[in-house]
Image: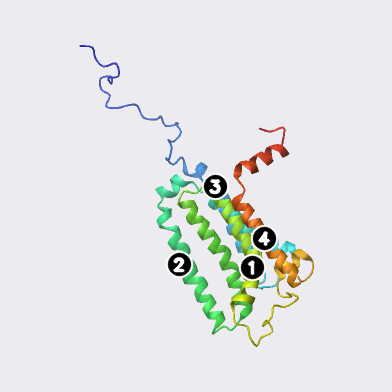
Amino acid sequence: MRADAHALPAGRSGPPGPGPGAPPGPGEPGRFLPANRVSLIAGAVAVGLAATVYFGMPHSRDIESLWVLLFKLTPFVAASVAIAWLDLPWAHRLRLPLILPPACFLVIFGYFIPKIFFYANLGADFNQLYYTVLIMVPFIILSLVLAVRLGGARTGTVLRLAAAMILLQLSGIEDLAFLTVNDLSGTEYATIPEVWTWADHMTVRLGHPPSKQEAYAFIGVHLFAAVLVLAVPGRLVRAAGRRLRPGRR
């Protein structure tokens, strides 16, 4: 009887494995540094920028200029890139889905929340309370997109979510919510002010403190932009990019 044409040669117990220089198969981690180079570089940049903002700039709710606002956003941008390019095979090999989300929760619950309680009660320092919340919200956004990435979301999805949520934070919707969801009877905010003098994040972009109507429009534009970031199909963005660069394919 003829031997099977696919029988293994004598002394061989299975098909040959990949050579030492072969690329990893689907779902297998490659070498750590090349696979995570974008995340490592962007993460280091994010840490450096965050340290510069936290230790080198005043802890104030006031925003002096548009450039100050943009610089304070740079750690968030760099951290978003680091998360979006995180190599998933390595993340799962290191069991990061079971480590990083609880670690992020502990930072919020073990650092930010006690700080808020302190400044709201014993510290009685509204400026520091506001600043603490101001830096906690981007950290919450990054924690959410990190969890999404560790769950398998694509790089584009992570970037969309990060961009949409920071637009929501910058929109001023919390200012409007403060004026509407709270009982402000007997205070200067019992009726919505005609001019929002406290909204520095609007003032530095408009060039003047916004009127009530301008604030409404400002919020609406940001909400619309956040929806666009989430809803516009990626293929349309890529097609627009090709039209802007007709010589490239």
Residue 93 has which mark? none
Q: What separation in Å lies between label 3 and label 1 (alpha carbons)? A: 27 Å
Kindly identify which numbered label has been placed on residue 106. Answer: 2
The mark nearer the N terminus, 1 or 2, is 2
Q: Nearer the viewer, residue 71 or 189?
A: 189
Q: In which quarter of the image is residue 142?
A: bottom right
Sequence-first tag of 3 and 2:
2
Q: Earlier in the sequence, mark 3 or mark 4?
A: 3
**Marks 3/4: CA distance?**
23 Å
Q: Which residue is drawn at 62% across and 55% down?
A: 227
Q: Mark 4 points at which residue?
A: 222
**Label 4's element?**
helix
Side of 218 relative to 15 (left or right): right
Q: Please, what is the three-letter code of the amino acid marked with disc 3?
A: Thr
Can residue 79 be seen in the rendering of this structure? no
Where is mark 1, residue-wise? 173
Q: Is there a contact, CB below 8 Å, between mark 3 and mark 4? A: no
Q: Which residue is found at the position 44% from the left and 49% from the top?
A: 91
Tell whether 144 sits left or right of 231: left
Disc 3 marks which residue? Answer: 155
86 or 204: nearer the eye? 204
Q: Which amino acid does label 2 sit on?
A: Leu
Where is residue 238? Give x, y as percent: 64, 40
Mark 4 or mark 2, which has the lower sequence index?
2
